[in-house]
Amino acid sequence: MTVTVERARVAKDARRQGGSRHRKDSYTLFLLPGALAFLAVIVVPFLMNTGVSFTDWRGVGTPEWSGLANYRALMDDSEFWASFRHSLFMVVAMAAVPTAVGLVLAAALFDYVGKHFGSRWAAVLRACFYLPQVLPIAVAGIVWSWILAPENGSLNEVLSAVGLGSWQQDWLGDPDIALYSVMGVMVWVQLGFPLVVFMAGLQRVDPQLYEAAELDGAGWWRRFRHITLPQIRPETYVVLTWCTIAALKVFGAVYVLTKGGPGGATNVPSYFSFTTFFEKTQVGYGAAVSTVLTVIILAVSLIGLKLQTRAEDAEEGVRA
Amino acid sequence: MLTARRNGRRTTRTAVSLVGPLVGALLLTSCGGSESGSSDGKTLRLWHYEGPDSAMGVAWKAAVEEFEATHPGVTVEFEEKGFEQIQKTAPMVLNSSEAPDLMEYNKGNATAGLLSTQGLLTDLTAEVTKRGWDKKIGAGVRTTSQYDTNGVMGSGSWYGVPNYAEYTMVFYNKDLFKQHGIAEPTSFDELTAAMDKFVAAGITPLASAGAEYPAQQYLYQLALSKADRAWVDKYELYKGKTDFHDAAWTYGAETFADWVKKGYIGKNSSSLKAEDAGVSFIQGKSPILFSGSWWYGRFKSEAKFDWGTFLWPGSGLTLGSGGNLWVVPKGARNKELAYDFIDITMSKKIQNLLGNKGGVPVAADPAAITDPQAKSLIADFNTLSGRDGLAFYPDWPAPGFYDVLVSEVQKLITGSAKPDAVLDSLQEAYDKGVPKT
């Protein structure tokens, strides 16, 4: 009897595996369009760009093979390294600050506004914070350049009106301030994204955890630290990875607000690559910059994904 | 297991057979050269980037109407482009089958000169001679039409035709000058004295913009005031070694920095754009703007005060050249129609219209220019070209030099670099960017 049951189970497993394999094969066809599109839109252009980065080319005519010359030149290019330093500032503005502030705001909206004023108010405020994400960066950038204009700019006018005229600055024209001004705009642009993701993440946290903690006398901060933060760790990884990548390849805001100025004070790698490519028509060199940038972004993405997977595995291990 | 591997191979083979042609097609598309296509003689594809209200925009619109009237059955497909758009994509567009029949393009070694060396533009020499355009275009203006085999302007074949000229001048607000009891300056000393009076009255006299061309044009004009034609030829035409630490450039950079300190140029102008400088003049905030004739039509229609112009005092040279060029892409399908259109823009009718709308025509009938301000504009240009005073623009010698100039002049405005360091950086970028032949 035992042997019969075991045989039946093995046969069933085999059928299941066979079916699964069959299903896998037929699913492959569904993956094909996506894979082809990925190949055509991402892989082939990237490989072509990498190929161009080994040449000396002005965009027209025949490229001349130059080997690693562009990469060697990059190593000694202080403008290139300065642009990467600025990128790190942008990571702070577009990833670190929005993630931290977004987390606190999401928790406050979910845990306080939602409970005391109703979920509708929380949704309205969430939409308000998300609005800059919907605006095209070209539009937002132009509006901010008006706000930050040295003469008649709204910010300086407001400072003057409230008796803080001595705080007036040339926000985008002073090399000591311009990068921080752009960072401020980017915090405003970016904040809505982590906020929305975190609020979605909070929806799936078991309310009983909060109730139990509340009954045990835990205040808001302790509940935030010991329940909210650990529970939405996967969302935190996704947001941090996503925002870091966005920060590394930021272009539109710099293009509209400062064009990398004054005197290169807000230059970033993507804008540097753009000007090298199109303005200086050093296409091979510009391609080298964008190749390096792509490799860095890929590395950051992989590290982010790895950390996320490790954290999820550890969490599952704890649960098991 | 074996079946699975076979299936895998089959899937791979299927994928390769599907992907192969796609990748091949992509590579062919991306690497493909120009496709001249065939002429249908029925359509003229025309691109230009002049604003519809500018003198050139009005004149080209009239030219299109004239062209359609004289070419029954031919349609003009006009596409309005942005300057930046054409500037940045022209090589790729002209190297594809999407090239128009006729296109407005920026002049200079780094632009039209570069494209000519790459074989992307049609050599117009025969057409220019046949249609007599060379007789209408003066020596100073035609410099930017001709390029040698290295793409250096001033000699060689004609690759573009300019229908107008442009030059820089001092625009000044007569009402503000009168209000502060300042007479129109006739010398450099009087100009600086006038600016001192405005500063004393709490007004920044010069409208400027560090994020775009206006600031670098002040710098170049200051240098030009200590330069001569040979200096310009060295800098722009590579006829000798350019030294950014020579007397002219040093004077330009140091005087510019000094003017910022004195308050002639706003310390907070580093992030401003050309539009901001123009608007500041139009709004009557800045009494002086040194810039190009391309502003003339706009000021004429928008400024609500009495204003006038004069050439930069104490300098035989100023920024200026022939205007943007009509170029015929090598791959244009209807070149004859393109030549006919250029011919119409060179006609007296269109040239006179251009002149009366505030442009600087190259072949107008002086008697037909009725507007007094336009007459003065053209008279100043004639004075300038008569003394061989067009010194082109500072960003022309090397690709990307415009951005370098913007960046370095911003440093002069913000005081983040001394004139000497700025000139060092300009020298480095210039030497790196000029042709090595």
Image (spheres, coloured by chain):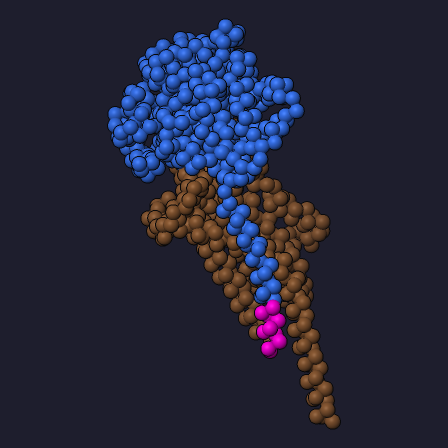
Chain colours: A brown, B blue
Q: Range of the magenta residues? A: B1-10
Closer-to-camera residue (B166/A176): B166
Q: Is residue A264 above or below residue A152?
A: below
Locate the C terminus of chain A by quadrant: bottom right
Q: Is residue A209 above or below residue B377?
A: below
The answer to whether residue A39 is seen in the rendering is yes
State the image coordinates of residue B288 (x, y, percent, origin top left). 43, 18
Residue lying furthest right: A1
Question: Is residue A65 inside the magenta stretch?
Answer: no
Image point (56%, 37%), residue name: B37
State the image coordinates of residue B216 (x, y, percent, origin top left). 39, 28
A152 relative to A130 in the view: left or right: left
The answer to whether residue A245 is seen in the rendering is no
Image point (55%, 50%), residue name: B26
Locate the N terminus of chain A by quadrant: bottom right
Question: Is residue B3 inside the magenta stretch?
Answer: yes
State the image coordinates of residue B45 (x, y, percent, origin top left). 58, 30
Closer-to-camera residue (B301/A170): B301
Image point (47%, 23%), residue name: B127
Q: Locate residue B63: give its quadrant.
A: top right
Image point (26%, 31%), residue name: B241
Closer-to-camera residue (A181/B78): B78
Q: How many numbered circles does the render carry?
A: 0
B349 relative to B146 in the view: left or right: right
State the image coordinates of residue A298 (x, y, percent, origin top left). 49, 57
- The kind of secondary structure the magenta stretch mainly shows is helix
Q: Locate residue B50: give its quadrant.
A: top right
Closer-to-camera residue (B211/B149): B149
